[in-house]
Image (tube, helix red, strand yellow):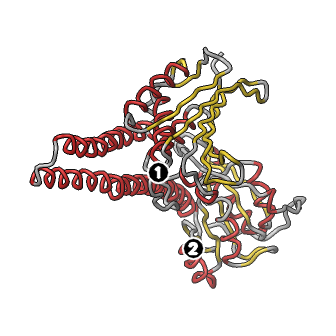
């Protein structure tokens, strides 16, 4: 134990700091065996400062680098300039007292371990500080070099463990939200699909009992098939959205119009009993984008919704393709304009966000548009929906997609 008389230290100039100037500091992946430990001491008593210096000298100067400040604002200023592995904090400072000092620091440097320096009469306060987030406390007058060294290393290691636990908790929350998302799919979409199949099957049985014509029975089979196909698409979409979340998708140059033609043929076959008027207007015949086979999912989902959510006898879809130059970059602008039921203003953003915990189930839109939004985002593109006739959503929708052109 050292007994050192108090003496005046050189005064350091202080700068007033605004809230905006105080930046968070992180501590990550430090190998304590190989690196010098940078210590910030926030203490206004010259004797205690000198004591810490001498104790560190006894431990070994090559292991530690000490920077000290006499008030909290000065300490924050140093945190903005340098990275520290540990903070020694006195709870009685000229510009801050008690647990307020600790809370102020924790709000800004939550990943750096803080050790409280306290007098014997403040031990209760020090224990409260540990409960509030400090890693340890040392009682002035009872500190020796072994205790100081052990406290620093243990505090840093405990802080590292806490940071890993926080990351694990964050990952758990993300996984939980994803599981809830897939549960949502099963509860709503699959239930609706299976209910349609059951109803069709019961109707087929009733027709058979009543000796209905074969034509009527085939019409019922069409109803069942119409329900099976969305079920198969739903399973496929879940697999694809899972791939997007895991970044397992590759990209390559692809001809946009070729994919669009394939999608249009599929839509016409799917709704062969509906009257669909589908036109494409394009300024360029050869358009390439950096994408993959999921591009077809974008076109399929938008056009399927345009037909399904249209109570008119004749469903119209007009596809307009143009070039949009922004910031010296060439982009493809695609507009899918329909005469369907339309989408209310309050729903125009929500339809692309299904699966977020804040969103409720959006009846009828299914998983498709949330998948579309994810795919477009993976292509560094944008998607939104407008009214076909501005200010009157009941006249139909215009889905707008912007994709970077590959030149």
Neighbor class of circle 2 (other Cα within 10 Å; few <14, some 14-19, many 20+) is: few
Q: Secondary structure beneath disc 1?
A: loop
250 versus 304 height, above or below:
above
Q: Earlier in the sequence, mark 1 or mark 2?
A: 2
Q: Quadrant of residue 405?
A: top right
**Image x and y of residue 353, in percent:** 53, 51
> Is 370 left, or right, of 8 in this rendering?
left
Front residue (pair 390, 49) = 390
Q: Secondary structure beneath disc 2?
A: helix
User: Can residue 400 be seen at all in this image of the molecule?
Assistant: yes
User: Can residue 168 be seen at all in this image of the molecule?
Assistant: no
**Image x and y of residue 360, in percent:** 48, 62
**Image x and y of residue 123, in percent:** 58, 81
- Label annotation for residue 236: none
**Image x and y of residue 189, in percent:** 35, 53
> Is 141 left, or right, of 78 in this rendering?
left
Q: Quadrant of residue 184?
A: bottom left
Residue name at image x 52 percent, y 58 percent: 159
Front residue (pair 180, 137) = 180
Front residue (pair 361, 90) = 361
Q: Quadrant of the C terminus?
A: top right
The answer to whether mark 1 and mark 2 are in CB contact below 8 A is no
Residue name at image x 89 percent, y 60 percent: 15
Query: Which residue is denoted by mark 1 in the rendering?
Result: 365
**Front: mark 1 or 2:** 1
367 versus 87 height, above or below:
above
337 versus 78 height, above or below:
above
Query: Which residue is denoted by mark 2 in the rendering?
Result: 132
183 versus 297 height, above or below:
below
Query: Whole-Å distance between the Cαs marked 1 and 2?
Result: 47 Å
Front residue (pair 29, 44) = 29
Q: Quadrant of the N terminus?
A: bottom right
């Amino acid at each position: 134990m050292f007994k050192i008389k108090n003496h005046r230290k050189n005064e350091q100039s202080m700068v007033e700091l605004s809230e905006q100037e105080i930046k968070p500091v992180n501590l990550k992946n430090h190998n304590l065996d190989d690196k010098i430990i940078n210590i910030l001491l926030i203490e206004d008593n010259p004797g205690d400062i000198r004591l810490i210096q001498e104790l560190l000298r006894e431990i070994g100067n090559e292991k530690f680098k000490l920077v000290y400040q006499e008030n909290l604002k000065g300490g924050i200023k140093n945190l903005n300039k340098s990275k520290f592995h540990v903070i020694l904090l006195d709870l009685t400072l000229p510009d801050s007292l008690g647990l307020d000092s600790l809370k102020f620091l924790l709000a800004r440097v939550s990943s750096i371990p803080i050790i409280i320096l306290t007098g014997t009469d403040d031990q209760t306060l020090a224990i409260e500080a540990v409960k509030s987030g400090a890693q340890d406390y040392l009682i002035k007058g009872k500190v020796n070099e072994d205790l100081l060294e052990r406290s620093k290393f243990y505090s840093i290691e405990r802080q590292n463990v806490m940071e890993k636990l926080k990351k694990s908790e964050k990952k758990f929350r993300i996984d939980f939200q994803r599981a809830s998302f897939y549960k949502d799919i099963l509860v709503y979409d699959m239930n609706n699909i299976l209910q349609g199949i059951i109803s069709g099957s019961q109707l087929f049985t009733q027709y058979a009992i009543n000796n209905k014509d074969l034509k009527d029975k085939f019409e019922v089979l069409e109803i069942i098939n119409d329900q099976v196909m969305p079920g198969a698409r739903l399973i496929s979409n879940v697999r694809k959205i899972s791939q997007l979340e895991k970044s397992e998708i590759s990209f390559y140059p692809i001809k946009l119009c070729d994919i669009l033609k394939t999608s249009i043929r599929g839509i016409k076959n799917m709704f062969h009993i509906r009257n669909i008027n589908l036109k494409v207007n394009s300024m360029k015949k050869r358009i390439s984008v950096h994408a993959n086979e999921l591009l077809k999912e974008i076109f399929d989902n938008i056009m399927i919704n345009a037909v399904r959510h249209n109570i008119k006898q004749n469903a119209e879809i007009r596809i307009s393709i143009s070039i949009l130059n922004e910031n010296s970059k060439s982009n493809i602008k695609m507009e899918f304009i329909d005469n369907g039921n339309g989408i209310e203003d309050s729903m125009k953003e929500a339809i692309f966000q299904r699966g977020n915990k804040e969103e409720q189930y959006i009846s009828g839109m299914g998983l498709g548009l949330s998948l579309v939004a994810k795919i477009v985002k993976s292509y560094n593109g944008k998607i939104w929906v407008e009214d076909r006739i501005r200010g009157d959503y009941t006249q139909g929708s215009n889905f707008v997609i912007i994709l970077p052109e590959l030149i």
